[in-house]
Image (spheres, helix red, strand yellow):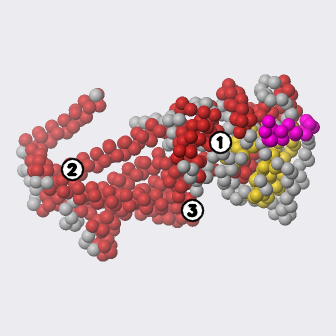
């Protein structure tokens, strides 16, 4: 309960400062949105279903893109970690590619896939694939060797070895990479949606800009943060807790 | 009385058979493999096994040199040697987890190619899967084999009962003590019904009481199941306590230095004066090798490491 109190104090303070600044009317509302303006936007957006549709569209896209990069990333990571040549060559390339914002792929994606869903998916995949690949590569290396030896010894090979031994054995080592991959996927998606009339949250945010409705912009920003927080708190925290209780690891502080 | 027990009783009475280590044969100069003819009841045969590898500095190191060994069906063979003699590596070769440079590992006269569930390894740090429950761990090998679920469940329960862990089927590995973990590892190995159990210092990390208990259990399970066991340890007393035969390896490169038949009545105990006496004889020879390994470590300028377990 102490934690809840700390949360209330912190967010109450943040909200209070915002409320106060808005009340003082130092800046006009079109420059500095008021809490009640944002609240009205949120309420209105949900009532006329704009936000529901936007959230559904965005979530669907990010899920598809993320799942593809998880599958691809695991295969790539495993391949790189088990081949010395690939590790030396491609491993280095991937690390340097990670400094490239995925939205840089947007012009090429447009050419290759046209102004479509697939272009957005491509950017999302490029955003999270590298994190997942590097996490898998690293996880495979950190994973105690004895698990794969024991697995092979007990008759697991090929896909069975991967599915029943290597994957679960490396999970505690890749979960933070999977989390990071998710965050990158989510960011890439919103960025791509802002550049393309697409019904997602990114577009709703840009609509706010186009109508100079800063309250709407803030409202969508809050939605984006909230969704990211919920996925992190529900999906990944749940996964971490399950891993901790099975492996007997001390809970991460 | 089963055949394997008969076979064990007929081990030659000579309490101590000295085997002259073979002339040093580098991996390059190994002649065309001439298999030493198998005797009756031979389960595992190592024929002219050599293993060399390149160190980080680029020089070739001979780890195992011309190892010839034969293990009979149902025999309990112990391999002792100073740390760094390659005794664990030898088990990995038999398990098929690592290829040898030259020579052959034969199971029932057939050369080993890669891992197989007829030879299951039990590791010092057990190698149990922490993401699976105890029952699922025991079931794992059978699942890989593709046995039907009902059969798997029945056998899992059977082998967990055999190691007295039936109540812990749904626990996770981290909830068990060290001794219990090793018992799960034994159950998991037995559940795939291997002919040969390869045990790599399985009890080295356990406290003395737990180890005594597991010696008794292992001896009982061995008697009940009639499996062939190859048990690697650096503890000579443990080897004499458990083995029908003890093979002593030399320090780097690992060669067979001597072989000892242990013809003491079972069940034995670590404290038995006969066990201590037999261990004493083996230890005298082992000590030479330990000294060599220490000299090598001094020469290499590394911190000397004395293996406390080797002191019986």
Residue at mark 2: chain: A
The N terminus of chain A: image quadrant: top left
Question: In the image shown, does B218 or A221 lie closer to the viewer?
Answer: B218
The verdict on residue B3 being magenta is: yes
Question: In the image shown, does B139 or A214 lie closer to the viewer?
Answer: B139
Q: Residue A60, located in which quarter of the rendered image?
A: bottom left
From the top left corner, tell me how far across and down residue A71 is, in percent: 42, 59
Q: Residue B286, located in which quarter of the rendered image?
A: top right
Q: Secondary structure at mark 1?
A: helix
Q: Are marks 2 and 3 on the same chain?
A: yes
Residue in view at x 58 percent, y 48 percent: B142
| CA distance for labels 3 and 1 | 34 Å
Q: Secondary structure at mark 2?
A: helix
- Whether B28 is drawn above or below A156: the answer is below
| CA distance for labels 1 and 2 | 55 Å
Side of A10 where A239 appears, left or right:
right
Of marks 1 and 2, the one in the foreground: 1
| CA distance for labels 2 and 3 | 43 Å
Task: In the displayed orientation, state which residue is furthest to the bottom.
Answer: A111
Instruction: Examine the rendering and report whether any part of residue B160 can be seen.
Output: yes
Magenta span of residues: B1-16
Q: Which residue is mark 1?
A: B190
Of marks 3 and 1, the one in the foreground: 1
Side of A70 where B244 appears, left or right:
right
Q: Residues within 10 Å of mark 3 (few under 14, many from 20)?
A: few
Q: Which residue is mark 2?
A: A223
The verdict on residue B74 being magenta is: no
Q: Which residue is mark 3?
A: A83
- Whether B271 is drawn above or below A228: the answer is above
From the top left corner, tell me how far across and down residue B101 is, in percent: 75, 59
Question: In the image shown, does A40 or A211 lie closer to the viewer?
Answer: A40
């Amino acid at each position: 309960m102490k934690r809840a109190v700390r949360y209330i104090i912190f967010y109450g303070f943040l909200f209070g400062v915002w409320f106060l600044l808005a009340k003082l009317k130092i800046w006009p509302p079109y420059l500095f949105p008021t809490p009640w303006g944002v609240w009205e936007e949120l309420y209105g957006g949900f009532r006329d279903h704009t936000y529901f549709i936007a959230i559904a569209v965005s979530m669907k896209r990010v899920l598809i893109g993320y799942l593809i990069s998880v599958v691809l990333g695991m295969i790539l990571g495993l391949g790189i970690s088990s081949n010395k040549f690939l590790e030396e060559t491609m491993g280095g390339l991937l690390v340097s590619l990670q400094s490239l914002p995925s939205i840089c792929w947007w012009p090429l994606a447009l050419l290759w896939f046209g102004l479509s869903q697939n272009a957005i998916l491509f950017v999302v995949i490029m955003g999270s694939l590298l994190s997942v690949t590097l996490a898998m590569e690293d996880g495979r290396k950190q994973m105690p060797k004895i698990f794969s030896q024991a697995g092979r010894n007990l008759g697991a090979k090929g896909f069975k070895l991967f599915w029943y031994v290597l994957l679960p054995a490396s999970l505690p080592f890749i979960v933070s990479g999977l989390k990071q991959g998710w965050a990158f996927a989510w960011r890439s998606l919103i960025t791509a949606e802002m550049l393309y009339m697409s019904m997602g949250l990114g577009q709703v945010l840009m609509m706010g800009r186009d109508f100079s409705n800063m309250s709407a912009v803030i409202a969508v920003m809050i939605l984006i943060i909230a969704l990211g927080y919920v996925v992190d708190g529900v999906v990944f925290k749940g996964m971490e807790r399950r891993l901790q209780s099975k492996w007997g690891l001390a809970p991460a502080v | 009385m089963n055949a394997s027990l008969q076979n064990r009783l007929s081990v030659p009475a000579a309490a101590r058979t000295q085997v002259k280590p073979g002339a040093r044969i580098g991996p390059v100069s190994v002649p065309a493999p001439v298999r030493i003819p198998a005797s009756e009841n031979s389960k595992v045969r190592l024929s002219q096994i050599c293993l060399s590898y390149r160190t980080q500095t680029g020089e070739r190191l001979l780890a195992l040199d011309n190892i010839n060994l034969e293990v009979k069906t149902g025999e309990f063979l112990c391999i002792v040697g100073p740390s760094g003699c390659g005794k664990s590596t030898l088990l990995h070769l038999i398990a098929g987890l690592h290829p040898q440079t030259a020579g052959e590992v034969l199971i029932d006269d057939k050369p080993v190619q890669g891992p197989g569930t007829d030879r299951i390894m039990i590791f010092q740090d057990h190698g149990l899967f922490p993401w699976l429950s105890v029952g699922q761990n025991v079931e794992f090998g059978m699942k890989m084999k593709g046995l039907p679920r009902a059969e798997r469940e029945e056998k899992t329960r059977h082998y967990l009962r055999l190691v007295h862990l039936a109540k812990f089927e749904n626990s996770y590995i981290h909830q068990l003590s060290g001794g219990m973990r090793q018992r799960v590892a034994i159950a998991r190995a037995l559940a795939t019904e291997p002919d040969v159990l390869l045990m790599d210092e399985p009890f080295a990390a356990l406290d003395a009481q737990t180890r005594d208990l597991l010696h008794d259990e292992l001896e009982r399970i061995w008697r009940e199941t009639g499996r062939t066991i190859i048990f690697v340890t650096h503890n000579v007393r443990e080897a004499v306590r458990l083995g029908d035969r003890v093979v002593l390896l030399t320090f780097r490169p690992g060669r067979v230095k001597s072989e000892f038949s242990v013809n003491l009545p079972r069940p034995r105990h670590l404290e038995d004066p006969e066990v201590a006496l037999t261990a004493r004889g083996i230890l005298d020879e082992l000590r030479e090798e330990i000294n060599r390994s220490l000299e090598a470590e001094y020469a290499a300028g590394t911190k000397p490491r004395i293996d406390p377990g080797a002191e019986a």
